[in-house]
Amino acid sequence: MRVLALLFVLTISLSACAKSVWAPDEVIAKSTYSSSDPATLTLVTIINNNSGEGGHSGLVINASQRVVFDPAGNFKSDLAPERNDLVYGMSPRVLRAYYGFHARKAWHVVTQEIEVTPEIAELAFKIARNNGAAGSGFCASSVTSILRQIPGFKHIPHSLSPKRTMRVFAELEGVKTEKIYEYD
């Protein structure tokens, strides 16, 4: 019982550690990127090359703008301002930089893209915009929380595990999976 109480307190403590980042409106407006590609949601999972464990989850949303919901992430770019874990300005160059930031000798990136309607993509964008910053260690939890609010994704179980989230997402019909390796 003590262990459960300690875990509960630790969970509450970690969630309180969310760091709010708020880029000004004019910076967001200057950095907006809209892609002509179809509307998509792309689950991004960072996998440890040695252990095979998941280290991070993010969600690329290609709606009226392409953004990355990067809960408790560390990606920073002058070309990609952030508001509470939502990173704007995800042009092809910046998106490659995002993937490259995560893919290195010890880690690789798994992207799982699924085409959705423009309305579903906009709903995901809206939910991510309103989500707020995630506490450290709650990336998969935040991503699954957003997905569970979207028609067609409501069956995805809440999870703290990036790898479990990746496995469940892989079961969706039409998912295109790619792996990105870099060794710098």
Image (spheres, rainbow, N blue to C red):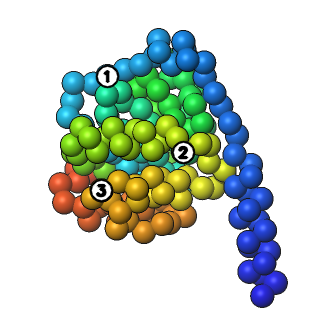
Query: Mark 2 to mark 3: distance in Å?
Result: 17 Å
Residue 88 percent coordinates (x, y): 47, 26
Which mark, residue 151?
3
Q: Residue at x 45, y 58 (%)?
A: 144
Callout count: 3
Does residue 58 appear left or right of residue 14 in this picture?
left
Q: Residue at x 20, y 34 (%)?
A: 38
Q: Classify residue 13 as left or right of residue 90.
A: right
Alpha carbons under labels 1 and 2: distance apart: 21 Å
In percent of width and height, residue 35 lies at 27, 24
Residue 9 vs residue 171, the one in the foreground = 9
First reached walking from the N terminus: tag 2 or tag 3:
2
Judge by depth and name the residue closer to the eye, 29 or 51: 29
* Left or right relative to 125: residue 20: right
Q: Amino acid at mark 1?
A: Ser
Q: What residue is shown at x 21% (from left), y 24% (from top)? A: 36
Residue at left offset 28%, top offset 45%: 120
Mark closer to the chain start, 3 or 1: 1
Which residue is under mark 1? 34
Q: Going from the N terminus, do you reach mark 1 or mark 2 first?
A: 1
Q: Nearer the viewer, mark 3 or mark 1?
A: 3
Q: Quadrant of residue 55?
A: bottom right
- Residue 53 visible to an observer of this rendering: no
Label 1 environment density (alpha carbons within 10 Å; few <14, some 14–19, many ≥20)? some
